[in-house]
Amino acid sequence: MGLKWSDREDIALELVERHPETDPLGVRFTDLHRWVTELDDFDDDPKASNEAKLEAIQMAWLEEYTDRQA
């Protein structure tokens, strides 16, 4: 079973692994959307995203990112 837009924590873990030095707050939503849909395990409709889903992913990614920076 692949990743869905609602799997924000799992997506965040994948993103922090792929982009360990990237501050999530500096990523535009257009890039974030592309990066999520390019994940190997992503298996959802790319058009099913919206600003709220992307923001939730970004905040989960930020939490992972700051945990690893500490």
Image (cartoon, rainbow, N blue to C red):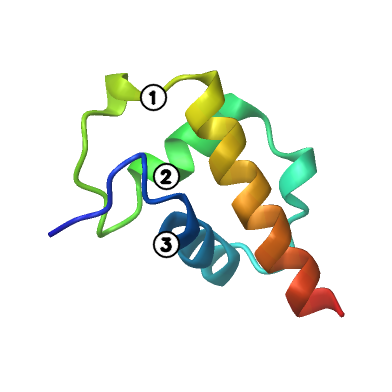
Residue at (79, 40) in percent of width and height: 26
- Which residue in the protein does label 2 denote? 36
The residue where tag 1 is placed is 49
Total marks placed = 3
Q: Select label 2 or label 1 by which is in front.
A: 1
Q: Quadrant of residue 52?
A: top right
Residue furthest to the right: 70
Task: Where is residue 12? Give x, y as percent.
Answer: 53, 58
Camera-nearest residue between 36 and 53? 53
In the displayed structure, 30 sits above or below 19; it is: above
User: In the image, residue 30 lies at what x, y percent?
Assistant: 55, 25
* Occupied quadrant, residue 58: top right
Q: Secondary structure at mark 1?
A: loop
State left or right for residue 44 relative to residue 39: left
- Which label is found at residue 10? 3
Identity of the residue furthest to the left in this view: 1
- Give the secondary structure at mark 3: helix
Identified by mark 3, the residue type is Asp
Q: Is residue 34 left or right of residue 66?
A: left
Determine crowd level at label 3: few under 14, some 14-19, many 20+ residues with C-alpha closer than 10 A.
some
Look at label 2 and name its amino acid.
Answer: Val
Categorize mark 2 by other alpha carbons within 10 Å: few (<14), some (14-19), many (20+).
many
Q: Is residue 49 left or right of residue 28?
A: left
Label of residue 20 in the image: none
Q: Earlier in the sequence, mark 1 or mark 3?
A: 3
